[in-house]
Amino acid sequence: MNLLLPLVPLLPLLMLLALVWPVTRGRVMGALWLAPLPALLIAPLAIGTSLVFYPGGIKITLLLDAPGALLMGGAALLWSAAGFFARAQMGKGPLAKRFAAWWLLTLSGCLGVFIAGDLLSFYLAFAVVSLAAFGLVAHEGTEKARRAGGLYLLLAVLGEIALLLAFALLHGRAGTESIAIADVAPVLHATPGGAVIALLLILGFGIKMGLLPLHVWLPVAHPAAPAPGSAVLSGAIIKAGVIGLIRFLPFDGAPMAEGSLLAALGFATAYWGVALGLTQRNPKTILAYSSVSQMGVVAATLGMGLTLGLAETPLHAAFYALHHMLAKGALFLGVGLALTVGLAGRVLVLPLALLLALGFGGLPLTGGALAKAAVKPELGAGLAAAAAALSAFGSTALMLHFVHRLRAAMFAAPGAAPGWRVSVPWLLLGSAALLLPWALYDAVTGQAPGVDWSAATIAPVAAGAAFAALWTRISLHVPEAPAGDLLVFAQHGSPWRDAAARAVVAVEQATRAWAVAGIALLLLILTFHALIGLRE
């Protein structure tokens, strides 16, 4: 099985090459769902395997641990279902071929990041998934899509810069020729500069996850992308940030002070996502803010695990993220299906959407209830428990608001009989979100799954449902916050912001000259090599 690990990112790239030849080009779109199948096969069978090879004398490591297997398997299932959905929705025109090219390139990086075990392969995979996803965001070519793509790309590059600096510092401070993550990550504990490196890692991976205040790309990008693109953006691609924090932060049982900062940032993000999401009208924008909120909970889980010194936190957080991956990916496909079939598909869409929505609040018998149970070692006591209960209340209210707005959108959509090519991916992913956590809970926690009907579990859901019923009556009278919130607010009437913008434009115009750009690139390369050579 370890010899099959390279096939995980390589098969999408081989299919990408098939777009070059006219004979095979027309068939690639219909075969998108096949590209993630090696990852789906390997995920449950190859846990604990690794592969090391030495191209050009550089030690490259591919590995699959339990958190990576959970996230890669879930991502592969989501990408396959969304690829099947895209086959029906996107057609076979020239735009479909362009979409397929961006799709396969992004898929290669997304799956590769879950098995990368060294700085070079991880950075390469992370850069591919980050930058190539621009094509999914901006695919439709409208002004809205181009603006969303530009914002996404800007923040993606900012995240890459933070990670490049963090990786250079890690390797330089480690004092070893190895670039394996396992060899350089312990520096975070061993060096006085570890706090700075940790903050750079949180910044770089936090942008991908959508943590406050750099979450603004999610509510702008998701509504602009087509439904299958939104599904993988929210479900799978943002999990590259999750696996990054899991891989690089030291969950070795020794408490880390930066964990408190990450936990506080996570809960602040969770509440912000709920508050802004409740003002939205567009179902996809509501789902985007819900993803912001849920990634905040994942960050809080990881932060509390660092603070408490819990070595099992990465597996718990990955399990929680797996549920979000499947449920949120399914709901984005459900929106695409609902807007296609209108009220003709209400029986197919609304009941399952309601169950998935309530799962985010922890309704018993849903996969979301088990996801919340899995993170109780981190979020089940003290102030963290109260903060988590408030988050569950907010998630319930927000997701019921989503169901209400989805139903309203179906009234305005054209009616059509649901086709099996779009119905099957929706039902498959939705069912997986409900059932798969039950199959995996024992392996993750060491305990048999159960049903918790305690007041601590039911109260946030019941209170959230009651609030949602009230909110339904008044929501249309509440001003809709602009998608992108902080970014838009910052654009109004700030003299210092305008002065900073003029300075940035002046620098940009000066560096357009090839000579200046070449010198800047040379300095960047020299700086990078200097950082690589740092030693304690």
Image: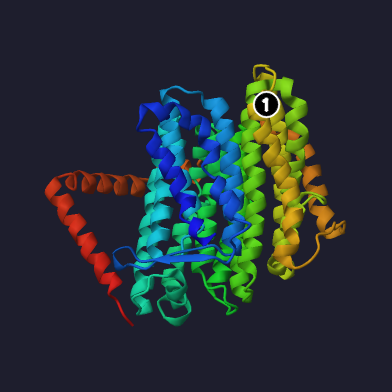
Can residue 102 be seen in this snapshot? yes
Q: Which residue is mark 1?
A: 420
Residue at the image point whose x is 74% and y is 60% from the top: 441
**Relative to 142, is 233 on the left or the right?**
right
Residue 7, how many percent across, how many down? 47, 51
Q: Secondary structure at mark 1?
A: helix
Residue at the image point whose x is 17% and y is 47% from the top: 510
**Near-viewer residue (346 or 215):** 346
Q: Quadrant of residue 283?
A: top right
Q: Amino acid at mark 1?
A: Trp
Residue at the image point whose x is 70% and y is 26% from the top: 408
Residue 365, how many percent across, how many down? 82, 50
**Near-viewer residue (263 or 519):** 519
Which corner quadrant holds the C terminus?
bottom left
Residue at the image point whose x is 45% and y is 40% from the top: 104
Can residue 272 be seen in this snapshot? no
Which corner quadrant holds the N terminus?
bottom right
**Relative to 335, is 359 on the left or the right?**
right
